[in-house]
Amino acid sequence: MKFFVDTADIDAIRELVAFGMIDGVTTNPSLIAKSGRDIREVTKEICDLVPGPVSAETVALDAEGMITEGRELAKIAPNIAVKVPLTWEGLKACKVLTDEGRMVNVTLCFSANQALLAAKAGATFISPFIGRLDDLNLDGMELIADIRQVYDNYDFDTQILAASIRSANHMSEAAKIGADVATAPPAVIKAMVNHPLTDKGVEQFLKDWEGTGQKIV
């Protein structure tokens, strides 16, 4: 499973890139606003850091506006994936932009039917939102599993990009189900390393080693 990081924080991206932990980046208007920077400037810097896809989101509500914005965003760098919402207008924009050879991430997916439409429109990525379904006492992972089954039934090329990831458990569950990609905040990706038994084991090893009075260097 590929890891994308969901942030516009350059320092956080740089750290994860240095460790080889991420394959791409997802952004949205909220994350850009949080960065306090110009969308073109920060997106270009991210694209220069990350060789993989960088999702940049349109804000228009009509297909024509999304297409115009998408083309403009795609000028920033060749690894831009234009992000459009899963609305009828968004699907229209997806079809046009995909036919032009651009990567398109169709976002805010909450049903298998929506995911099926996005695949038919040629989406590069479909972004089902796990956490927001969980917030409504629905199982977001069931949606990932449903989309995986549908896509496998018909060999769709659209990649499942599990989004709205809230925990390390979300990451492992998405991987077990077969999501192609998961995008998560930096803190969630880093939290995947944590386990109390690992910490306890390191503590015991160090204690035993100190008892020998030896040094490696």
Image: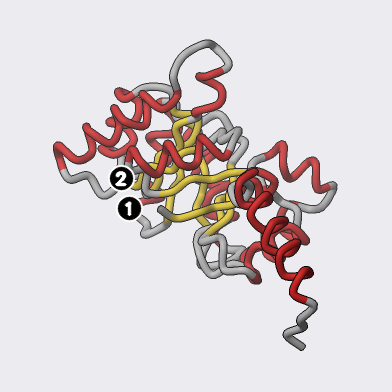
Indicate the secondary structure of the residue bearing disc 2.
loop
Query: Where does label 2 land, which residue?
Result: 122
Amino acid carrying label 1: it is: Asp
- Hey, which quadrant is residue 206 in on the image? bottom right
Q: Residue furthest bottom?
A: 217
Question: Where's residue 170, x and y in %?
Answer: 51, 35
Is 68 positioned to the left or the right of 46 in the image? left
Q: Separation of disc 2 and disc 1 at Cα?
A: 8 Å
Q: Residues within 10 Å of mark 1 (few under 14, many from 20)?
A: few
Is 113 positioned to the left or the right of 59 in the image? left
Q: Is residue 27 visible?
A: no
Query: Where does label 1 land, which residue?
Result: 99
Q: Residue furthest top?
A: 137
Reading the chain from its start, which is encountered first: label 2 or label 1?
1
**Residue at left offset 56%, top offset 62%:** 21
**Residue at left offset 50%, top offset 19%:** 133
**Residue at left offset 44%, top offset 32%:** 128
Q: Residue furthest front?
A: 212
Question: Where's residue 176, x and y in %?
Answer: 35, 41
